[in-house]
Image (cartoon, helix red, strand yellow):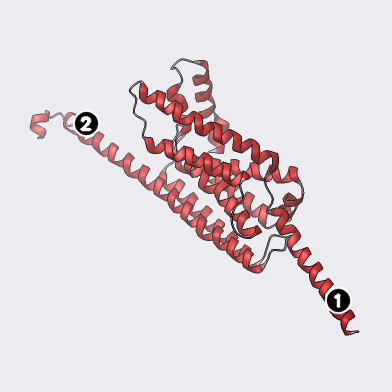
């Protein structure tokens, strides 16, 4: 009787352990064909970018080399996150992938200013350049780059992923998983582009609106991370330690990327303010009707 009870308890424990770990490991799997395709495109872009920058410098135009480093590093990070094996438990590794694909890689890519590079390398009157400018300045793109809307698409998508059964479905259905990864990447790029606004767009939003949007998005991201620390996504069962580590990674890693985004906004505001002040200083002597000598 004792042996039978012990055997029954051991079987029940094994079944419970398997039930808890199956969804987690399913979610820890690779990104399949989608990841391979995006990684290939990212690596090709990482090769094309330095070639275009070298062509620009070869004709005498200035193009800072740190942009090359940012863009190629972002491409490499994106390819690694989508195809490589990340350290930690299933949820921790998944969250490291989320931070890279949705936040860190988009920031690095946007800092490279790829749209500006393409526009400067294309001939001035070429159809490709006119088409690209028309798309960048179109009304639909302007609407998508409205910072609050971009934040809702980005952070709202994460709340939908982690606070509904969608995360569990994505782990077991490759097509759903590919769509989720595509949305996370696209929404992360859109939000980062809208907040930084380094490339030419149809309408530039002021730093106050972009900064307020970043603060609101950061708050929503932090609240989501805290909720995941307490409760896993519906339909999944991760070990408590793995869940806590992944949630902390989401919380503190998100803070780091958001601080970097805030630095970009502040730096751009400082540079733009300095330029405006210098223009006013140069125009002041002539605007007041005095000669430069008298103004001195």
Can you see residue 235? no
Rendering coords of residue 183 (x, y %)? 64, 43
Q: Which residue is mark 2?
A: 283
Q: Residues within 10 Å of mark 1 (few under 14, many from 20)?
A: few
Rendering coords of residue 184 (x, y %)? 62, 45
Asked if disc 1 and disc 2 are in contact, CB closer than 8 Å, the reply is no
Is 289 placed left or right of 57 in the picture?
left
Asked which quadrant contains residue 53, the reply is: top left
Of residue 45 and residue 85, the one placed in the foreground of this image is 85
| Number of callouts | 2
Residue 164 position (above or below residue 229)? above
Q: Quadrant of the N terminus?
A: bottom right
Q: Which mark is residue 7?
A: 1
Q: Quadrant of the C terminus?
A: top left
Mark 2 element type: helix
Residue 130 position (above or below residue 148)? above
Residue at image coords 39%, 24%: 56
Residue at image coords 80%, 69%: 14
Residue 20 position (above or below residue 35)? below
Of residue 6 and residue 258, the one placed in the foreground of this image is 6
């Amino acid at each position: 009787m004792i042996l039978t009870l012990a055997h029954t308890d051991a079987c029940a424990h094994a079944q419970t352990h398997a039930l808890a770990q199956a969804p987690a490991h399913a979610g820890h799997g690779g990104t399949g064909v989608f990841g391979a395709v995006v990684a290939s495109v990212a690596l090709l872009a990482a090769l094309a970018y330095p070639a275009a920058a070298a062509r620009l410098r070869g004709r005498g135009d200035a193009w800072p080399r740190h942009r090359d480093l940012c863009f190629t590093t972002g491409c490499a990070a994106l390819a690694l996150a989508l195809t490589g094996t990340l350290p930690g438990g299933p949820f921790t590794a998944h969250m490291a992938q989320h931070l890279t694909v949705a936040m860190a890689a988009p920031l690095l890519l946007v800092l490279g200013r790829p749209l500006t590079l393409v526009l400067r390398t294309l001939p001035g009157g070429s159809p490709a350049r006119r088409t690209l400018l028309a798309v960048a300045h179109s009304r639909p793109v302007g609407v998508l780059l409205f910072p609050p809307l971009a934040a809702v698409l980005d952070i709202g998508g994460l709340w939908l992923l982690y606070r509904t059964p969608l995360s569990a479905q994505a782990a077991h259905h490759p097509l759903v998983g590919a769509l989720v990864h595509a949305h996370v990447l696209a929404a992360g790029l859109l939000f980062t582009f809208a907040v930084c606004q380094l490339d030419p767009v149809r309408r530039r939003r002021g730093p106050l609106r972009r900064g307020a949007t970043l603060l609101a998005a950061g708050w929503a991201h932090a609240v989501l991370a805290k909720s995941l620390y307490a409760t896993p996504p519906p339909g999944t069962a991760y070990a408590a330690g793995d869940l806590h580590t992944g949630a902390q990674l989401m919380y503190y890693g998100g803070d780091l990327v958001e601080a970097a985004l805030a630095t970009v906004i502040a730096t751009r505001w400082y540079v733009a303010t300095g330029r405006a002040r210098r223009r006013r200083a140069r125009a002041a002597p002539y605007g007041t009707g005095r000669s430069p000598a008298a103004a001195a």
